[in-house]
């Protein structure tokens, strides 16, 4: 019998915070944890102690239908800056822009737009005559 380990959302948030250059102070991290754990899309998936109810092995990415209603591109870029020290250093809001838009603008300017044509979303939009 295999024992499945559960993901602890608070432990994960503590781990992420401990591995970034500019750590959040404990009170602020606590507020974020409370906000995350009380969000409708999360609270139904965790128990009272913050343990994810489902094992990682059983996770089906297609089951997260509301993912893009909660997470947007700015969130993804912020996470990339948190986990990639070079990106954090290069895009540390030196220009004082809101949301560190320089990172986003550089990605947009360097994106090969022909790549979009090989995606499912492009095929769906083409079949609906949107593009």
Image: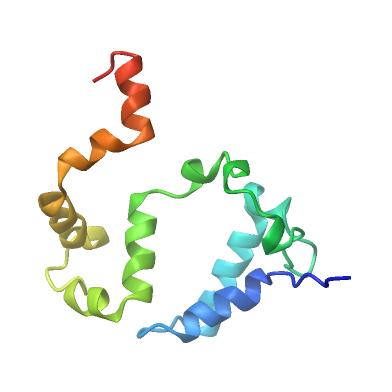
Q: Quadrant of the N terminus?
A: bottom right
- Nearest the viewer among 106 and 120 is 120
In this picture, residue 51 sits left or right of residue 36: right
Residue drawn at (45%, 80%), measured in percent from left and top? 24
How is the rendered protein coloured?
rainbow
Give the image location of residue 34, x and y in percent.
63, 66
In the displayed structure, 100 sits above or below 85; it is above
In this picture, residue 18 sits left or right of residue 12: left
Give the image location of residue 111, x and y in percent.
16, 50
Q: Quadrant of the C terminus?
A: top left
Residue drawn at (32%, 76%), measured in percent from left and top? 84
In the displayed structure, 29 sits above or below 46; it is below
Give the image location of residue 81, x and y in percent.
31, 70
Picture mark count: 0
In the displayed structure, 12 sits above or below 116; it is below
Residue 97 sits in quarter: bottom left
- Nearest the viewer among 107 and 18 is 107
Residue drawn at (74%, 67%), measured in percent from left and top? 51
Give the image location of residue 95, x and y in percent.
11, 68
Residue projecting furthest to the right: 1
In this picture, residue 6 sits left or right of residue 12: right
In the displayed structure, 88 sits above or below 46; it is below
Residue drawn at (40%, 82%), measured in percent from left and top? 20
């Amino acid at each position: 019998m295999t024992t499945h380990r559960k993901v602890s959302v608070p432990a994960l948030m503590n781990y992420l915070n401990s591995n970034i250059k500019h750590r959040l102070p404990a009170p602020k991290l606590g507020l974020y944890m409370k906000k995350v754990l009380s969000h409708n899309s999360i609270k139904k998936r965790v128990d009272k102690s913050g343990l994810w109810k489902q094992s990682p092995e059983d996770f089906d990415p297609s089951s997260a239908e509301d993912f893009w209603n909660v997470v947007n591109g700015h969130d993804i870029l912020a996470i990339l800056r948190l986990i990639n020290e070079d990106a954090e250093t290069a895009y540390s809001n030196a220009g004082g822009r809101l949301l560190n838009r320089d990172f986003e603008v550089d990605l947009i300017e360097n994106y090969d737009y022909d790549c979009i044509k090989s995606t499912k979303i492009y095929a769906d939009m083409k079949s609906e005559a949107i593009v």
